[in-house]
Amino acid sequence: MTALRRTANKSGGRFEPRLKTVGLFAGVGGLELGMCQAGHQTIGLCEIDQAAVAVLRARFPNAEICRNIEDYDSLPEDVQLVTAGFPCQDLSQAGGTLGINDGASRSGLVGEVIRLLLSHDPEWVLLENVPFMLQLARGESLAVLIGALEDLEFRWAYRVVNTLSFGIPQRRERVYLLASRSRDPRDVLLADDVGEPGPRVWTKDLAAGFYWTEGRGGLGWAVDAIPTLKSGSTIGIPSPPAIALPTGELVTPGIRDAERLQGFPTDWTRPAAEEHSASARWRLVGNAVTVDVAEWIGTRLRSPGKYAGSFDTPLVVGGRWPQAAYNVGDGRFLAQCSAWPVNREQARLHEFIDHSEAKPLSLKAVSGFLSRYESGNLRKNARFLQMVRAHRQRMEDRVLVASGD
């Protein structure tokens, strides 16, 4: 798909008032913080996770918090924007691949959002989820969700957006779906597009991120960035990605860096550790929405652009949905949009992280990774392989020194 460059979409003098917002499945408030930074007001939150609620209470003290969406009888009368980063366990590749229409799926809770919309008419609805939903069950999961919105006479547009676009060194793609009964969501979500830049070349002065938990079938390799932050293991063990530094060292970032890699201020999730456990912070950050992406959407809600879809074609779904699409009343169309609405200057990864908090990749971790990498079928990068072997040797030497041998 060839993306059109749309970088000068002015608002034409329009500047919308701030919106009163309710966040469902709010997590630690990434969507809501971004909206607040764009000038909107969070009046209500809904989240069942106790550790996440500790963060929300500390960071959004004036918002009413509901613990269970099934107990949410109705939305506040004055709400104008409903956001929902609904549970993705069964929509992601890491989950059981159950669609939202499956009664056994936690992601079926998005049906509760539809229930609330039946009795209320907010100006906007913003949903977020993982890109795998575009292909899950040959696109059935997204078809069910979009069909429900269309039955409620919502116009909608969705788009995959990459966190890298916002200058943050994390390669993270998420689907954002914006809907309204009275407004054109394309002017918010699709009006900006710079096109995805070409691939980055790994040079000696750049860091690279990879997943040390992988190595046999993939690396999650990212030049001058980390691969997508994850929520950790099912038993709560953090699994941050590793970073190959220009110095040759292999390190893992600290939780405060992870927060910043999601656009949060440092220590945003500290209340979770104070009331629950430190390991909970990794899970919460890995599941969060990148704040900068939410702020961009929130800013466009206040100052819409003008979408030009001259080259768009009717949408035919077969197997998976495209990267961007919409229906504003004239049928479903494929949108010529990349995952890069903007292209902000990016900080170098090795300069972005706090080296005082980064930890060397442990001997156990690097040994396991090296074994998988050497025995797997992946094409080997000679310089990277040498770095990994040298790091393992350094860690072995440290163990010997520590043991006194």
Image (cartoon, rainbow, N blue to C red):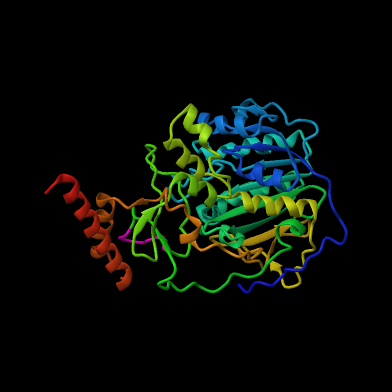
Residue 379 in sight here:
no
Q: Is residue 400 visible to us here?
A: yes
The residue lying at 63 percent from left, 74 percent from top is 2
Q: Which secondary structure type mostly characterizes the magenta part of the structure? A: loop
Quick one: 390 or 225, which is closer to the camera? 390
In the figure, is residue 85 to the left or right of 302? left
Image x and y of residue 212, in percent = 34, 55
Magenta residues, as a range? 215-221
The tally of labels here is 0
Q: Position of residue 117 (x, y in %)?
A: 72, 37
Residue 222 quadrant: bottom left
In this view, the residue in front, 318 or 202, is 202
Q: Nearer the viewer, residue 200 or 316?
A: 200
Q: Is residue 268 above or below residue 366?
A: above
Residue at 66 percent of width and 69 percent of height? 194
Quadrant position of the N terminus in the picture: bottom right
Q: Residue 153 colored magenta?
A: no
Where residue 280 sits: x, y (%)?
45, 36
| Residue 371 position by quadrant | bottom left
Query: Which residue in the rendered view is the most extreme toward the right?
Result: 13
Look at 69% across and 26% down and name the residue there: 73
Q: Quadrant of residue 214?
A: bottom left
Q: At 59% across and 32% down in the image, what residue appears?
A: 47
Task: Indicate the position of residue 156 as horizontal and vertical percent values.
Answer: 72, 53
